[in-house]
Image (cartoon, rainbow, N blue to C red):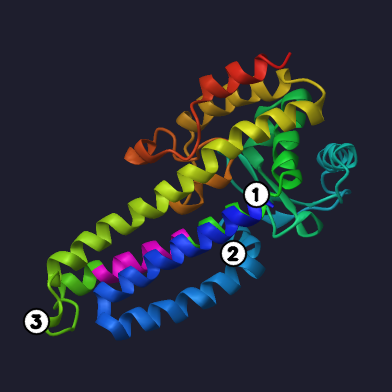
Amino acid sequence: MVNSIKTALLLGGLTGLIMIIGRFFGGEQGMIIAFMFALVMNFGSYWFSDKIVLAIYRANPVSPSDAPELHRMVSQLATHAGLPTPRVYIIPSESPNAFATGRNPKHAVVAVTQGILQLLDKEELRGVLAHEMAHIKNRDILISSIAATLAGAIMILANMARWAAIFGGSGRDDEEDSGGIVGLIAMSILAPIAAMLIQMAISRAREYIADATGAYLAGTPTGLANALRRLAEASRLIPMHSEPYTAHMFIVNPLSGATLMNLFSTHPPIEDRIRRLMGYS
């Protein structure tokens, strides 16, 4: 119920941002077009957000015969959590990371990078998979996927507004547009920041909860705590080529050490997560 309310608020908030951008971009007509665009995005993000995110990272499905140990861990954790076994995907990236996606537990996916399979031992990998299974059990995956899709759409519209400001303004009469080009530029800068702040508010709290649930599912917090420590260090050395609007989906920030996006990190500090985890032992 709580996540259903959060999902509705997220859809409403990001839809409002899209409409505001449309208002600056093309006046009343632009706002109407943006609203129609938002409706299409809301529908698409609900039904297809998982496919969109998996396609962005060129994730490939793997069968039990392709990755027997990985499938065995996922199946055992799903059984312990009382969930259907999710599909398993591998992302062709050397940067170690993982995420879960899907609109509900019956359509869930767990995706891991090639790098994480090479870096972690069995206990650590089990801890990471338990964390992702916790997101599925806590029904975080829909709101996370929707946030990624709509935030990406907002960034696209913000870029359109920026180029419109550069090449001739909003296309409206100046008497009807008190903001004019300045307003377009302001929106093109502030809208993506607002979208990321919304993601941060959702993501940080859910990471702590998923850590706690994951420790319970794995039977010990040690594997996940050790994994987080190693993943944080490795992601700084091998940052992932990822889109900022999907960063909140991963178990650790894939942008770590790569850009100033750390100022808007969607993840709690690793040290805090480890300290809380070890408090459960």
Q: Say above or below: 130 vs 166.
A: above
Name the residue rendered at 50%, 37% in the picture: 253
Front position among marks 2 and 3? 3
Q: Which residue is mark 1?
A: 2
Q: Which residue is mark 2?
A: 52
In front here: 9 or 42? 9
Name the residue rendered at 59%, 64% in the picture: 52
Residue bounds of the magenta highlight:
151-161
Q: Which amino acid, by three-letter code, is at mark 1?
A: Val
- Determine if residue 241 is in view: no
Image location of residue 31, percent across then percent down: 34, 79
On the rendered structure, is 81 left or right of 264? right
- Determine if residue 203 is in view: yes
Q: Are marks 3 and 1 in contact (CB under 8 Å)?
A: no
Give whichever of discs 2 and 3 has the lower sequence position. 2
Report the Cα–Cα distance between label 1 and label 2.
25 Å
- Chief secondary structure of the magenta portion: helix
Image location of residue 171, percent across then percent down: 18, 83
Q: Which residue is mark 3?
A: 175
Report the Cα–Cα distance between label 2 and label 3.
41 Å
Label 1: how many Cα within 10 Å (few below 14, some 14–19, many 20+): few
Report the Cα–Cα distance between label 3 and label 1.
45 Å
Q: Which amino acid, by three-letter code, is at mark 2?
A: Ile
- Quarter of the image for residue 70 reads top right
Secondary structure at numbered mark 2? helix
In reply to whether residue 138 is colored magenta, the answer given is no
Image location of residue 217, percent across then percent down: 81, 31
